[in-house]
Amino acid sequence: MLLFRNLVKLSFERRQKIIGSKFKAKLVLTFLALSLVPGILIFLIASNFITTSIEGWFKPQVEKPLDQAMEVAQTYYQSLETTALRHGRYMGRVIERDGLLAESKREALAGYLTEQQERLGVAAITIFNRDGQELVHVKNPVLAAVPTREANNEHVRQALAGQEITTVHELDNGDMIQAMVPVRDGDHPVPAAIVVAIHVPQRLEARLRNISQAFQEYKQLRLLKNPIKASTSYSSC
């Protein structure tokens, strides 16, 4: 403001040709240069420092571990889904081979499913008949507080129509992965469907969810890289 005031004052003095106005103009311009040059240098240095810092936030060394962690989480869930499907197919073949769906072999069916649940360590195994009604349900006693009977009726109907389906249900105490596999009987219509459930504990599920959330937040922040750089450069100015 002082320099601007003096410049205006000098312009009037030069118009009036007051003695010493040229010297005063040179003096004011010198002070103006002394004030602007350091400010410009500081701005350039600060802007370059901020730009370098922001670029460092989005280096491949930062993005790659997040991307890999997300892939690990997705691969883990896909592996559990594949495992549940494999167990369901195996048990379906045994049930078909031994004729365990017969009314007279209901106890044998329950005993076989209980044995497989303990051997495989799955959360629960459920058999639905062709009408979508539950025939047998066995579950891990350790998961007594976890709901394992819930199954989407539409998915059950699709399994009874001959399709294999995997789903992930969010629970209050973790995630439940379900694989629905038709139990075939030769060329006859599918008489039943088997549902194999695998429970993902809450602590592990929370960590996987945090990985997913961090990855999504990072992707959103990456979209703001250029606006952040422009904003900080303007602020430093």
Image (cartoon, helix red, strand yellow):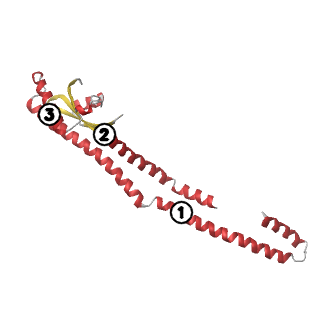
Q: Quadrant of residue 175?
A: top left
> Dividing the image into 4 quarters, which one contains the N terminus?
bottom right
Q: Residue furthest top?
A: 103
* Quarter of the image that includes the C terminus: bottom right
227 left or right, relative to 198: right
Identity of the amino acid at label 3? Answer: Glu
Name the secondary structure under disc 3: helix
- How packed mark 1 is, by other alpha carbons closer than 10 Å (few <14, some 14-19, many 20 or more), is some
Q: Is residue 7 above or below residue 222?
A: below
Of the numbered discs 2 and 1, the one sitting upstream in the chain is 1
Amino acid identity at mark 2: Pro
Please give the residue where the numbered disc 1 appears in the rendered image: 51
Q: In the image, is 197 to the left or to the right of 216?
A: left
Q: Indicate the secondary structure of the residue bearing disc 1.
A: helix
Task: Give how far apart the Cα atoms at labels 3 and 2 are.
Answer: 22 Å
Disc on res. 6: none
**Mark 1 near mark 3, Cβ–Cβ under 8 Å?**
no
The vertical placement of 51 against 115, above or below, is below
Query: From what the image shows, is residue 68 above or below residue 151?
Result: below
Q: Earlier in the sequence, mark 3 or mark 2?
A: 3
Task: Say which residue label 3 marks.
Answer: 115
Residue 205 image position (x, y, % from top left): 34, 42
Horizontal relation, residue 146 to residue 92: left or right: right
Query: Residue 36: x and y, percent?
Result: 70, 69
* N-terminal label among 1 and 3: 1
**What residue would you read off at disc 2?**
201
